[in-house]
């Protein structure tokens, strides 16, 4: 059950699209499909090299507004608006706070399909998957050849429950 709420109907409608597999907006260059016009526009910008979001503090430019916001926080403002409600940890990115919260909850939502191992984040699970190739050093000789990105995606990368960690997430001013 989803617990998303919003006071703006546009935000609510955009969120509702995440619950459907419908992707009506298609890239004319590679035929990849997207849920929203904004996602499509950002994708097309990666093909064309267009970077419409310019940093006012330096010469950097970005494909998405989110990339610009993240850049400014890391490089210029040092703002960390995502704060842990349990300790003094704060982060530039919500995803890093979500991963941090798991150190308090003990949640390990990323389960290996081949053994009982579970991880707090996908990177550690992908690194773990190398142990099943018979070579933990990363030599691409086992069933998961190549980079860590070649590890098959599946139920072991399930999304975490928003309800489970929402009480720990706060946004600073």
Image (cartoon, grey):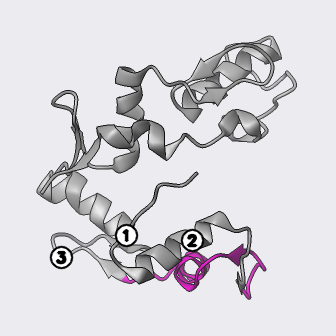
- Circle 1 packing at 10 Å, graded few (<14), some (14-19), many (20+), is few
Residue identifier under label 3? 56
Residue identifier under label 1? 6
For the question of whether residue 114 can be seen, the reply is yes
Point out the residue furthest to the bottom here: 28
Q: How much space separates mark 2 and mark 1, taking CA atoms?
A: 11 Å
Q: Which residues are magenta?
A: 27-52
Front tag of 2 and 3 = 2
Q: Give the numbered dot on residue 16.
A: 2
Q: Give the numbered dot on residue 68.
A: none
Q: Nearer the viewer, residue 54 or 101?
A: 101
Residue 38 in the figure: left or right of residue 113: left
Regarding mark 2 in the picture, which secondary structure is present there?
Answer: helix
Regarding mark 1 in the picture, which secondary structure is present there?
Answer: loop
Point out the residue furthest to the right here: 143
**Residue sitting at x 42%, y 76%:** 11
Could you tell me residue 164's position as x and y percent?
46, 36
Q: How much space separates mark 2 and mark 3, taking CA atoms?
A: 34 Å
Could you tell me residue 69's position as x and y percent?
28, 65
């Amino acid at each position: 059950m989803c617990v998303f709420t919003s006071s703006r109907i546009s935000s609510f409608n955009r969120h509702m699209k995440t619950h459907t597999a419908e992707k009506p907006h298609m890239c004319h260059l590679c035929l990849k499909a997207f849920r929203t016009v904004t996602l499509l526009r950002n994708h097309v910008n990666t093909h064309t090299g267009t970077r419409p979001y310019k940093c006012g503090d330096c010469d950097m430019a970005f494909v998405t507004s989110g990339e610009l916001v993240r850049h400014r926080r890391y490089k210029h403002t040092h703002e960390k608006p995502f704060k842990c409600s349990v300790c003094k940890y704060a982060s530039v990115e919500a995803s890093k706070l979500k991963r941090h919260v798991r150190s308090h909850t003990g949640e390990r939502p990323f389960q290996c399909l081949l053994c009982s191992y579970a991880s707090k984040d996908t990177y550690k699970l992908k690194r773990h998957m190398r142990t099943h190739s018979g070579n933990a050093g990363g030599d691409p000789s086992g069933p998961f050849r190549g980079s860590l990105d070649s590890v098959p995606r599946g139920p072991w990368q399930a999304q975490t429950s928003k309800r489970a960690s929402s009480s720990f997430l706060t946004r600073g001013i």
